[in-house]
Image (tube, grey):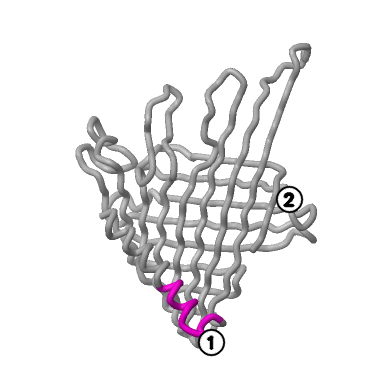
Amino acid sequence: MKKIVFSLVLLLVVNFINAQETSNDTIKLWTKKGNISLLFNQTAFNSKWLGGGTSNLAGNFGLNYDFNYKKGDVIWDNKFIAAYGLTKVTGSKISKTDDRLELNSLWGKKAKGDWYYSLFFNFKTQMDVGYDKDGNTISHFFSPAYIQFGPGIWWKKSNNLSVNFSPATAKLIVVHDHFTDFGPSFGVLQGDNSRLEFGASISGYYKFNVMTNISVENRVNLYSNYLDKPQNIDIDYQMNILMRINKYITANLALQGIYDDNTIKAVQVREVFGLGVNYGF
């Protein structure tokens, strides 16, 4: 199954490279933009500080890269996301604050107006080992990995506002089998290393400017599994606020909320705020 996923990812990369190298006319069909950010947070207290607190240092790296294609009534939007963060609290070991690797690909052929027939692919995993509060390994690269794909209908008002609905979405959850030796993990049953679901998916994207130099980016994905408790909708919402101080210095706020009762019957929340270096290319 891993070979299938890597083959799909490789196909996207090969198609992208071939499209860039064929001719000058083809190059004009592609638009590319990317952003790299480095965020830093620090809190420090000397031994005489009476107000309480613990010194800590944190850093976060983020990469967003878009490569989109448009020719006639066909569009193909691709987004690659990588993020990694670490924090060190005095008296404790270094721990992760963020770890994401994601590829989104959405192909569309115009139907009428702002509507397109679509086909989408989404891949999510992490890069590093994850531990619970007792120091036990609970995840690592490709464990878990989430893959979704399916046909649908896509409403794209602009590059900053779009919604895709896929009523026939396949979802695959992959984990290493050592995580299921003694019980289920991430929805994968004991003794298995994958779980296949079939359901409906809705994904939306909305970006707007609050004021000059302050932008808000929203991404949401909803999924209902027809085969098991379709009323329990998986939710993944991400909001990124970029406050640009100058060309390179920014303040960033990232907020993510996840609900997936296959993993944990509770809402997972992640929030990262920091001042850092931001470079667009």
Instruction: Rate crowding at label 2 as few (under 14), some (14 to 19) or many (20 or more) other CA atoms within 10 Å.
Output: many
Query: Camera-side residue: 42 or 253?
Result: 42
- Please check the rendered image and state whether residue 87 is part of the magenta-colored stretch, yes or no: no
38 is higher (above) or lower (below) than 41: below
Could you say whether the residue bearing mark 2 is in a helix, strand or loop? strand
Identity of the residue drawn at 56% across and 40% down: 85
Report the side of 269 relative to 231 (left or right): right
Looking at the image, residue 271 sits to the left or right of residue 96; the answer is: right
Residue closer to the observer: 160 or 178: 178
Sequence-first disc among 1 and 2: 1
Residue 88: x percent and y percent?
A: 59, 28
Residues rendered magenta in the picture = 15-27
The vertical placement of 94 against 139, above or below, is: above
Q: Name the residue under label 2.
A: 250
Does 20 lie within the magenta span? yes
- State which quarter of the image contains the C terminus: bottom right
Instruction: Farthest residue to the left: give it.
Output: 191
Using the numbered discs, state the Cα–Cα distance from disc 1 to disc 2 in whole angstroms.
Answer: 36 Å
Residue type at mark 2 is Thr
Image x and y of residue 241, in percent = 67, 52
Give the residue at x 66% y 60%: 280
Residue at 51% over, 68% down: 163
Confirm or deny contact between disc 1 and disc 2 (CB under 8 A). no
Helix, strand or loop under label 1: helix
Q: Residue 25 carries which label?
A: 1
Quarter residue 109 falls in: bottom left
Is the magenta region chiefly helix, strand or loop?
Answer: helix
Q: Residue at the spot x=62%, y=58% of the render? A: 35
Nearer the observer: mark 1 or 2; the answer is 1
Residue 49 point in image, percent of width and height: 77, 15
Q: Position of residue 1 (x, y in %)?
A: 25, 55
Vertical order, 273 against 239 (above or below): above
